[in-house]
Image (tube, grey):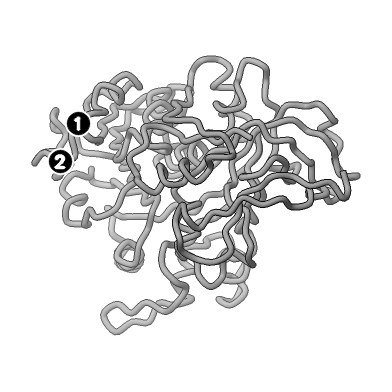
Amino acid sequence: MAGKLMHAVQYNSYGGGAAGLKHVEVPIPAPSKDEVLIKLEAASINPYDCKLQAGVARPILPRKFPFIPVFDVSGEVVEVGSGIKNFKTGDKVVSMLKSMVCLTQFPLRYVKLSGVVFGMHLFKLLNQKALDEKLDPERQTQRIINVIPGGGGLAEFCVAKGNRTVPRPPEVSAAEAAGLPIAALTAHMALTQFAGVKLDGSGPQKNILVTAASGGVGHYAVQLAKLGNTHVTATCGARNMEFVKSLGADEVLDYKTPDGAALRSPSGQKYDAIVHGTTGIPWSTFEPNLSQNGMVIALTPNPSTMMTFAWKKLTCSKKRIVPLLLDAKGENLDYLVKLVKEGKLKTVIDSKYPLSKAEDAWAKSIDGHATGKIIVEP
């Protein structure tokens, strides 16, 4: 398809919100050796997409302007790179464009706590794999930065890495599949790798709290947790309480009520893990609700989160807060797609927009009150 043009949506600078998105005609990208070219059927907007435009990773990301946003896509393979052996033209797939690790939602600079400069040492605590390999702090920082993605989903075509792409069976629609990558993989990692929930239902019962349970990550987290041996408490707005109950939550709190704001379980449960997908809740609210070895898994870490994380780590506290750095693996995405096929997991779609109205989908995401996923269809 060399030389052919496609419709895409991009932004040319930081800021601007939905009004900053521009509809353009650009060349169809060519896949490299380890990539596939996908004709897109659906893409899913995540909150991080809009935060990236707002400058959350400035000046590191985006790497350059103009930038075509969105990382979660589904469609049909129309061309494969020379090194791709497991896909062919015509295959239906779902992909997370390149790799995504959300460091923290504040600029990469030194943080001071009680006179101790953490800076790069904070990254040493965060990046355990690099710590194990005894990399120096500068190399660790570079290692983390290098795995952040290049976007490309708000378009008619995109290129995707073969190891971040999995088959989509006919039982799973393009929209259902596109909702999965970042949101469902984040929920899966939080529950299985951090909270220790076994999704086959084995293991001891765990008490789990999911905040923002009607959102993209939250609605997957409730469903996945209930596949394990768990008691799930969830928070959401009053209008979504019945919806969250329908996902399987054992008890649901309106976050605007006193008990909801305090995260108090109606049945008096102490939480072994809190999958925390919102902001503005201090450690002093979390701590009395945690079990003896309970943890808060922070999906949107801020400076306060990072300082609490570092302090709890340094003081060897049993109760702790940990930032989740998404490690997206193709085999986990494939597992989630199979759960959808089997009817054990569902993507709840808040709304769908054509690519020509992508700015309306963007504005909906910025508003922050979507129930489930926001989908754009070329």
Asked if the residue under mark 1 is in contact with the one under mark 2, i.e. CB atoms within 8 Å, the reply is yes
Task: Estimate how packed mark 1 is, as few (under 14), some (14 to 19) or many (20 or more) residues with alpha carbons within 10 Å.
Answer: some
Label 2 vs 1, first from the N-terminus? 1
Q: Amino acid at mark 2?
A: Lys
The residue lying furthest to the left in this view is 258
Q: Position of residue 357 (x, y in %)?
A: 53, 40
Q: Position of residue 215 (x, y in %)?
A: 37, 37
Is any part of residue 15 visible from this angle? yes
Q: Position of residue 362 (x, y in %)?
A: 47, 46
- Left or right side of 269 for 117: right
Marker disc for residue 256? 2
Q: CA distance from mark 2 to mark 1?
A: 8 Å
The residue lying furthest to the right in this view is 82
Task: Give the camera-side residue of 121 and 218.
Answer: 218
Q: Secondary structure at mark 2?
A: loop
Residue at 53% across, 42% down: 358
- Left or right side of 32 for 337: left
Q: Secondary structure at mark 1?
A: helix
Task: Give the camera-side residue of 279 and 53.
Answer: 53
Residue at 35% across, 22% down: 247
Q: Look at the picture and state if 365 lies above or below 247.
A: below
Q: Quadrant of residue 194?
A: top left
Task: Estimate how packed mark 2 is, as few (under 14), some (14 to 19) or many (20 or more) residues with alpha carbons within 10 Å.
Answer: few
Q: Quadrant of residue 81?
A: top right
- Left or right side of 182 for 153: right
Q: Amino acid at mark 1?
A: Ala
Task: Give the camera-side residue of 161 and 111.
Answer: 161
> What residue is shown with label 1?
238
Is any part of residue 144 visible from this angle? no
Q: Look at the picture and state if 308 lies above or below 156.
A: below
Q: Look at the picture and state if 349 lies above or below 4.
A: above
